């Protein structure tokens, strides 16, 4: 449905001017408020009594559905964390987290600061219900009457364990709010970005703990976050970036240096190629498949000295005529029968599969008076063999690319498997 149709809908439902509603709607959508949520908040703004369907009834959390307009719920606050969003053109601090009762748990967003803390038992009267990703969520706002109960509610142990929000990296999922992690800072770099309020400095890198690794962004650089250190972070949220969940550390997060060492787990998930591609991107994944081709742009290549992108015939698309820097890389297609990805090997991994250094490659190209011979050599060495590859998978309009961290010939009788595979391909 177009924005115009949504506005039409709302205007006729609420009996207000369409243009007015449309401009409000546009404003919200521009600031990434999902259209359903935007419509609901406009219904509230223009005072639609019908959406609630009468007085809200008291409900168990497990019984709440996205179709409920408003409900009254009693539950234990599992987590509660502040976050800043831009709403109707101005910054707004919201509180997000999860609420549980004896029957289930539900995410909530509080548009006012009710002073919710993890462990509190509350009753939220007339809480709005909205749908997010197919699941119901609670909206606590102006029209919600919130009270703190003296007697705490009994909840299942699995939920009780969640109180406070302590989590391991491997358990984090896009959409998680108010989580606490204790992590080693595996990689960290300071970057300047063009933010919504002009140029601003941020930190980005990789966190690790016993369970695994995830990328992070720290929007308000904390001095405690430095490469090689260990920190406890309270009130972080998880958002998807380039198809991968990312830990976001905001101005509302608390960062404390830890004086214990955190061991970073070596486990990564092994998946079928097709399955991995369907996830839309994974930070750390292991794939096993056959190298079926080495793509153009592999072997000895030249990069622009300004932007480091690969150039052709001394021409950078952005910087024109440049003196290229020689480099090595491989773009190999890995296929396991369920799908295919382009595996990108950096200079070091390329030296391994080529069996020589950049100097060797330059010399081979000079002798042959053709730099393609380097790619040909690599092709002869790897095509048809089975590899176990680990790295970061991204899936976008350019296809599925795996930035390899390791690229090893598969241990279990690769030749037999390769022969079998090639026979299958020929058949
Ligand atoms: Zn360039």
Image (spheres, rainbow, N blue to C red):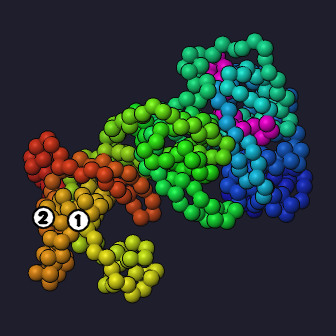
Percent position of residue 407, x then y: 24, 52
> Within 10 angstroms of label 2, few (less than 14), some, or many (20 or more) residues?
few
Instruction: Categorize mark 1 by other alpha carbons within 10 Å: few (<14), some (14-19), many (20+).
Output: many
- Give the magenta-colored segment's residue range: 95-113
Instruction: Say which quarter of the image contains residue 67.
Output: top right
Residue under label 1: 294
- Mark 2 or 1, nearer chain start: 1
| Residue at 14 percent of width and 81 percent of height | 366
Is 248 positioned to the left or the right of 66 in the image? Answer: left
Q: Is residue 363 left or right of residue 97?
A: left
**Residue 327 drawn at (x, y percent):** 28, 71
Dominant secondary structure (helix, strand or loop) of the stretch shown in magenta: strand
Residue 348 lies in quadrant: bottom left
Q: How many marks?
A: 2
Point out residue 395 in the picture as x, y percentages from the top left corner: 42, 56
Q: Is the residue 16 above or below the residue 311 in the image?
A: above
The residue pinned by badge 2 equals 380
């Amino acid at each position: 449905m177009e924005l115009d149709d949504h506005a039409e809908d709302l205007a006729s439902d609420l009996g207000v001017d369409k243009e007015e509603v449309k401009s409000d709607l546009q404003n919200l959508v521009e600031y990434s408020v999902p259209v359903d949520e935007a419509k609901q908040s406009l219904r509230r703004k223009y005072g639609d009594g019908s959406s609630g369907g009468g007085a809200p009834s008291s409900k168990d959390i497990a019984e709440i559905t996205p179709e409920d307009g408003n409900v009254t719920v009693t539950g234990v606050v599992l987590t509660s964390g502040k976050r800043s969003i831009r709403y109707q053109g101005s910054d707004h601090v919201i509180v997000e987290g999860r609420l549980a009762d004896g029957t289930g748990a539900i995410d909530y967003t509080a548009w006012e600061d009710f002073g919710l803390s993890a462990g509190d038992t509350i009753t939220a009267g007339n809480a709005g219900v909205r749908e997010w990703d197919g699941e119901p969520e609670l909206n606590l706002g102006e029209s919600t009457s919130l009270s703190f109960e003296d007697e705490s509610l009994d909840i299942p142990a699995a939920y009780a364990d969640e109180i406070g929000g302590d989590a391991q990296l491997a358990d984090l999922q896009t959409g998680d709010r108010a989580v606490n992690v204790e992590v080693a800072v595996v990689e960290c770099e300071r970057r300047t970005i063009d933010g919504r309020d002009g140029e601003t400095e941020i930190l980005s890198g990789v966190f690790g703990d016993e369970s695994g690794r995830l990328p992070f962004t720290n929007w308000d650089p904390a001095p405690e976050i430095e490469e090689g250190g260990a920190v406890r972070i309270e009130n972080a949220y998880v958002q998807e970036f380039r198809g991968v969940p990312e830990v976001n550390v905001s101005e509302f997060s608390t960062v404390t240096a830890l004086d214990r060492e955190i061991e970073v787990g070596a486990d990564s998930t092994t998946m079928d190629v097709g399955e991995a591609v369907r996830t839309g991107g994974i930070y750390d994944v292991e794939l096993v498949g056959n190298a079926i081709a080495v793509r153009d742009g592999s072997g000895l290549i030249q990069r622009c000295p300004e932007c480091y992108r690969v150039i052709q015939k001394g021409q950078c698309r952005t910087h024109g005529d440049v003196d290229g820097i020689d480099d090595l890389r491989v773009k190999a297609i890995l296929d396991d029968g369920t799908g295919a990805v382009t595996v990108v090997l950096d200079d070091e991994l390329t030296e391994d599969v080529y069996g020589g250094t950049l100097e060797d490659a330059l010399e081979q190209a000079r002798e042959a008076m053709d730099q393609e011979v380097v790619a040909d050599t690599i092709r002869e060495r790897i095509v048809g063999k089975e590899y176990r590859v680990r790295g970061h998978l991204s899936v976008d309009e350019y296809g599925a690319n795996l930035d390899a961290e390791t690229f090893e010939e598969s241990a279990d009788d690769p030749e037999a498997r390769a022969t079998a595979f090639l026979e299958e391909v020929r058949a």
